[in-house]
Amino acid sequence: MVGIMPLDDVTVLDLTHYTAGPFATRILSDYGANVIKIERPETGDPARMLPPFYEDKPGLERSGLFLWLNTNKRSITIDLKKDEGRDLVLELVKHSQILVENFSPGTMDALGLSPAKLLEANPKLIITSLSNYGQTGPYRDYIGNELNLYGMGGSMIGAGNIDHEPLKTAGRMVNYHAGYVAALASALGLYTVEERDELGDHIDVSIFETASHSIDMRLNRLMGYQYTGRLAGRQSQASAVGSGVHPCADGYFLITGGARFIPNIIRMIGMDELLDQEEWSTPEGRAHPDRIDEFLPHLIPWTLSRTKEEIRKEAEKHAVLGGPMNTIEDLMNNEQFIDRGYFQEIDHPETGPIKYPGYHFTLHRDEDQPMPDRKRAPLLGEHSEEILQEIGLSKSDIETLKKKSVI
Amino acid sequence: MVSNNSKSLPLDGLRILDLTVVWAGPYATQIFGDWGAEIIRVESIKHFPATTRGMVMRPTKEMVSQKGSLSAYPDRDPGERPWNRTASFNAHARNKKSMTVDMTKPEGQKVFDELLKISDVVIENNVPVSMDRINVNWERVSNVNPKIVMLRMPGFGLDGPYEDYRTFGSHMAGVVGHYSVMGYQGELADMTGNTLTADAAGGAGAALALAAGIRYRNHNDKGIFIEIATAENFANYLGDHILNYTVNNRLASPMGNRDISNAPQGVYQCTGEDRWIAISINSDKQWKSLCNLIGSPELAKDSEYSNAAQRRSLHDTIDQLIEAWSKGMDAHKAMRALQAEGIPAGVVMNEQDAFSDPHLEENGFWETLEGDETGKYQYASTLWKTVLTDRSHKRAAPRLGEDNEYVYKELLGFDEDKYAEFEAAGHIGMDYDI
């Protein structure tokens, strides 16, 4: 029975590792799903050995990246290469509604866990395969990573300045976005099974295709190119009065908006009388390129004597489109995020309490129940026994599996 | 709740009232519409929403000659009804319906109530104050239909000091710190409107929230209200950097396309205009293969370059060597040659590349649709593939008010007289009347 969270009674069998896959299963756990993370014995998910490490000391339970991507999950170690390991997965599948994996295409088949085998064990299972390029196609076996997947996915050609090379987004966004889509696809797959009383299905999510399909200017530009025959490329520096990145007392502030907003910017810096001058009194006059440089000696002293947050408040007051160029530290101290209780502090045996980014969403329930706290990431194999007992294995069964190094 | 879309799609039968604008919200409804949900855009001929059906209602010749998809109209001609011909709307609005109603009037509010009663979901991503003006909030919608699922996507949250802060994706990215780590080394990049990952993240996140909300509703037999603040959602995409700060108090600086572990990594020029190959060396083995490929085999044996840390300190030199090779290569040829050696490499693809890409072609990424006031064009198919489901699109983007007759007469039971009345009163139409 669905209780507090929408996916309370859903079990996700998680065969993912590294970043994109675990991002997908983590967000399903945020919505309440019971995520069983299957890891390799001894070494576990390779992401456990990715930096940043707590105190810069590597260790299986010290990777900040792993800890963040795997909150709320339970860990069981299974050697998938062994027959008994494979059989264990097929048994767990019977108690799950969703299975997510992000091995390179062909791996699951080679492990004896093809979609056919999985659906034989549970005909209502939703199997979500997440890979760099998809399960089929000429690029299927290409090597992919954040940079070339973003480049090929296409939004990159439009990112950055026209005077420079195309520029990648920060961190692992392309990977995470594909993970988000994999979670979404799994949820819709589940809807099909439950609401339309249909059999399970195999879902194919590709990082290359989710990037190619992205609304973040890619879809728009694909349409625009068909309409005009022109490649969008990268933009040059902003060319309207007041627009651009401006230095301020504690960093930088970005103002955008174009011609319509110029009077608002002028009023924001208290130069209303400028609008009475001939060249400044009409849209055509204000649009003349000379105005851009003429305006800077008025604008920059104003921004330099104010903090990012002060400028932001003034911008909001005067309907000027702009935003502070915050650092991550600014973000962690931002009054809006703090007011909303966004950041979550979670304790952990190795790191002690550390802060994590918060929920992607807020559920407002009638009873005004607060969102539940997230639980820390699991230690390697922490829940092996617990999970196996849940599916009916006896203590001696479990001992046998341990002796055979299956778990 | 019957729909006009194909009966073989998973979300057939689900009806969504769509009050979304710009891109983040529309992306969520695009995803749901692609999979069969009936998406009814609730629009108004009395109100032109910002950056949704074009930057302006009637762009000038000068505006449509500018570069960029926001100024793109078929053959650079805005036509009689430019709001039906704008690229950035038509890209996402396939499979959706459009009706018009003026919700600033009491009878318009009644129409909205009637729509709420027969719908499963209502979704919006407007500045909160504009929804207050037309009384679109959880209290109202749940009173009318206690089983409705409501999704609201404010920029920063429905409460808090930023609740009225109006931003575009670029500013929001600045607030959450993206531009402190995305940028050219030693420079401030111009970040105006180039890549708006927050919108894509918002759309995908909203769609997932809808799926979760609908499940909650179906199992608990009551509605639910979900809020996704786009900034909170997107901040998670910076998780790497946030953890770097919370774990070790470290702030990264922009490194251009370089990487903290992989060296070399970057984007290198190829033959032709604005043609680039992205290359990332993730192992010493890949480094050796690269050396042989670019005609510098001696470097493969040179101990000065043997590990990533060393290569990072010699990055500028290595970049020059790579570019000396790539400058004479066609980007696609370079990609094939590098991938053949097991090196992660890829063409930085432009629009032309996408339409002629053999992988996208073979995987059925494209579909052709014909729009009434635009013509035949290619559209990206669904966001993912399934084995069992038919995924074909049903129609191109709706013209403004395209489905007024269907919504008012078939769904709401208006007769001819009442329909004419609402036309006269400025609710029903296909042309803006501002």
Image (cartoon, coloured by chain):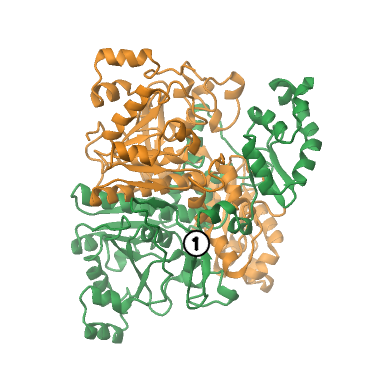
Could you tell me residue A144's position as x and y percent?
48, 57
Q: Colour of chain A?
A: green
Kindly identify the residue that appears in the image at 49 percent across and 47 percent down: B157
Could you tell me residue B374's position as x and y percent?
43, 23
Residue A97 located left or right of residue A179: left
Q: Give B231 or A395, whichever is nearer the viewer.
A: B231
Residue A353 located left or right of residue A96: right
> Helix, strand or loop at disc 1?
loop
- Name the residue tied to disc 1: B342
Could you tell me residue A82's position as x and y percent?
29, 77
Q: Give B288 or B247, whichever is nearer the viewer.
A: B247
Q: Is residue A259 above or below residue A75?
A: above
The answer for which chain carries disc 1 is B
Chain drawn orange in the picture:
B
Q: Is residue A197 above or below residue B264?
A: above
Q: Amino acid at mark 1?
A: Gly
Residue B54 located left or right of residue B6: right
Could you tell me residue A360's position as x and y percent?
45, 53
Q: Residues within 10 Å of mark 1 (few under 14, many from 20)?
A: some
Where, quadrant-wise, is the N terminus of chain B in this rendering? top left
Kindly identify the residue that appears in the image at 56 percent across and 39 percent down: B166
Q: Is residue B392 visible?
A: no
Q: Quadrant of residue A72?
A: bottom left
